[in-house]
Image: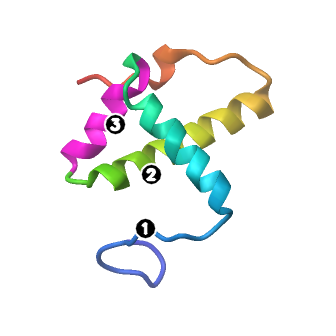
Amino acid sequence: DSGNKTGQRRLSKRGWPEIRRLLYAAAMSAARTKTWNGFYHAQREKGLSTTAALIVLARKLLRVAFSLFKQKSNFDASIVAVKT
């Protein structure tokens, strides 16, 4: 737990709806790929619901994309691979 929040977290609908929708769609697609399937299933094994696991994956995709943009580098799947 961090800050003043303790206990179960909830998914919110903050932010731009269209961006949220696109990130969620990207996560649904990525969850079926060899690169991101392990990460998605690792989240599901933690006990997260399907929606929550996809949101975690969407945030991960966004962080990776932003990092690649800032560093002006190419994607390397071996860095994000999850051993299952």
Q: Do the residues labelled 2 and 1 touch (CB within 8 Å)?
A: yes
Q: Residue 84 carries which label?
A: none
Residue occupied by mark 1: 11
**Badge 3 element:** helix
Q: Residues within 10 Å of mark 1 (few under 14, many from 20)?
A: few
**Badge 2 element:** helix
Question: What's the distance in space between the residues labelled 1 and 3, CA to CA?
Answer: 17 Å
Q: In this view, does 29 lie to the left or right of 52?
A: right
Task: In the displayed orientation, state which residue is furthest to the bottom.
Answer: 4
Q: Which three-letter amino acid code belongs to the residue tagged 3? A: Tyr
Q: Position of residue 80 (x, y in %)?
A: 47, 25
Q: Which three-letter amino acid code belongs to the residue tagged 1? A: Leu
Determine which quarter of the picture holds residue 28.
top left
**Which span is picked out in magenta?**
35-46
The tag earlier along the polypeptide, 2 or 1, is 1
Q: Residue 40 carries which label?
A: 3
> Which quadrant would the C terminus be assigned to in this image?
top left
Q: Do the residues labelled 2 and 3 touch (CB within 8 Å)?
A: no
Residue occupied by mark 2: 55
Q: Position of residue 79 (x, y in %)?
A: 50, 20
Q: Is residue 52 magenta?
A: no
